Amino acid sequence: MAKKTEVQSITASFDNILSGQPWFGRAVYKILEEVDPARAFIKPNNTGHSLCELLWHMITWAEFTLNRVKGDTENDLAASESLDWRVMDPKQHSWKKGIKEFQDIHKKIVQLLKKKDDNWLNEKVDYRKYNFRFLLEGLIQHDIYHLGQIAYINKLLPE
């Protein structure tokens, strides 16, 4: 039977940062739910990124990761890069829709990972020069990094 210890550790990390009790504080979903959707498109000092832009940026790279884990060769790196830091249309990119999309993608990633073994983590990722271990650990770090920005900006925005 193939070993799954490392894959299980990665899925546990996803579960913990997304909805558990991560070391850094409140979980991702908790912080995202604290945002008032009416303020999600405000840019602090009219510069930088809005909360919504940050969320949809996170979605872009989570979706890239999901497509790589699925082995989807149609949705390649160029497709993801074209969506990165996209123009936000409030009708299409609402905060509520973004949270659902973010949750759905991460749920799919974790479900797929449960079918993988530790050897798979060493395989090279399509369109990249690194393996799946690096990709998945990178997505976890990416989520935490931008979550910190979202939490901070959310506190800075006027009520």
Image (cartoon, helix red, strand yellow):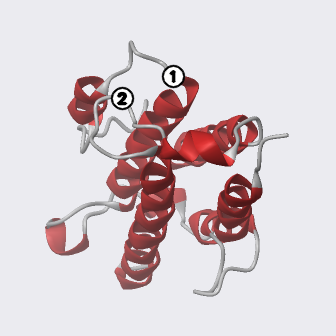
Indicate the position of residue 13 as horizontal and vertical percent values. 66, 66
**Image quadrant in which you'd find residue 73:** top left
Indicate the position of residue 155 as horizontal and vertical percent values. 43, 83
On screen, residue 29 versus residue 2, left or right, reads left
134 w.r.t. 80: above or below: below
- Please report whichever mark, 1 or 2, sits nearer to the chain's N-terminal start: 1
How crowded pointer 1 is (Cα within 10 Å; few <14, some 14-19, many 20+) is rated as: few
Q: Are marks 1 and 2 in contact (CB under 8 Å)?
A: yes
On screen, residue 80 versus residue 31, left or right, reads left
- Inter-mark Cα distance, 1 to 2: 8 Å
Residue annotated with mark 1? 71
**Image quadrant in which you'd find residue 33:** bottom right
Residue in view at x 39 percent, y 53 percent: 52
20 w.r.t. 102: above or below: below
Evaluate whether residue 124 shows in this view. Answer: yes
Q: Could you say which disc has been placed on residue 111 in the image? A: none
> Which quadrant is home to the N terminus?
top right
The kind of residue tagged 1 is Gly
Q: Farthest residue in the left direction?
A: 47
**Secondary structure found at label 2:** loop
Residue annotated with mark 2? 126
